[in-house]
Amino acid sequence: MSGTSTREALVEQGALLFARHGVGGVTVRQLHEAVGARNESALQYHFGGRGGLVAEIVRRHLEAIEARRARLVAVLAAEDRAGDLRGLVHALAAPMADDLGEPVGRAHLRLVDQLSHPSLAYRRPFRVVDAPAGTAVVRWLNDALAHLPDGVRVERLVVLRGQLVALFAMRAQLLDEAPGPGMEAGNALFVENLLDMLVAGLAAPASPATEAAAAAWEHCD
């Protein structure tokens, strides 16, 4: 196997193995065996170690998501729909949904879920790769939810991110490990229903109790 082939095989097989067994559950030997590498230092040579391979897999995944999202964002901008909540959530979700259709894409969704610490939701998004489309969607969502107290808006966007990451990973795992009759054909239903639920959650009026909790949070801050 050529150097280029070995590198690409490590990216693909690494994603599949990490998704199935977890990053810490895959040995260097297993990675080399999966790609038929005779050189036991292939992983080190190409990526500097397991951490470098994981970073490369995630980088490629996020860049592919951003490229798909950019096309959707361009349509939203051209149609002056920056305030369309369903359109904005669709622009976040649809590029992820595209990965449900093939094994490596599903592995990417599962791996991102494994690596996604909850604290990341409270930080500036899209820092791993340059993602102007994703950043635009988040900015438009903030504007669309500007009528909500600041704390409520923050928490709703945190929940939105968590649900997208976790539920797409869950769907990917089901397709990989327990594909029932019609499961893959039901992906469209899964996505459209998910959009309905996420938009309803974002658009729900804040209750008096929530507004009081937000006011107390802002006072403490």
Image (cartoon, grey):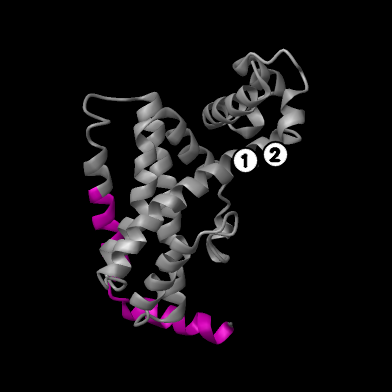
Q: Amino acid at mark 1?
A: Glu
For the stretch drawn in magenta, the main secondary structure is: helix
Q: Position of residue 147 (x, y in %)?
A: 34, 82
Residue at 35% in and 29% down: 175
Q: Secondary structure at mark 1?
A: helix
Q: Residues within 10 Å of mark 2 (few under 14, many from 20)?
A: some
- Say if mark 1 contacts mark 2, CB within 8 Å: yes
The part of the image, by quadrant, that contains residue 41 is top right
Where 95 sits versus 91, above or below?
above
> What is the quadrant of the N terminus in the image?
top right
Query: Residue lying furthest bottom in this view?
Result: 219
Q: Secondary structure at mark 2?
A: helix
Q: Which residue is mark 1?
A: 56
**Residue 203 on the magenta span:** yes
Stretch of the chain drawn in magenta: 192-220
**Residue 136 on the magenta span:** no
Q: Position of residue 199 (x, y in %)?
A: 28, 62
Q: Position of residue 15 (x, y in %)?
A: 55, 31
Q: Amino acid at mark 2?
A: Gly
In the visual, does 166 lie left or right of 51? Answer: left
Q: How many numbered callouts?
A: 2
In the visual, does 198 lie left or right of 157? Answer: left
* Residue 184 numbered tag: none
Q: Which residue is mark 2?
A: 52
Residue at 34% in and 33% down: 101
The part of the image, by quadrant, that contains residue 143 is bottom left
Where 29 sits versus 112, above or below?
above
Where 29 sits versus 150, above or below?
above
> What is the quadrant of the C terminus in the image?
bottom right
Instruction: Out of 204 and 129, give the one closest to the viewer.
Output: 129
Q: Residues within 10 Å of mark 1 (few under 14, many from 20)?
A: some
Residue at 58% in and 65% down: 123
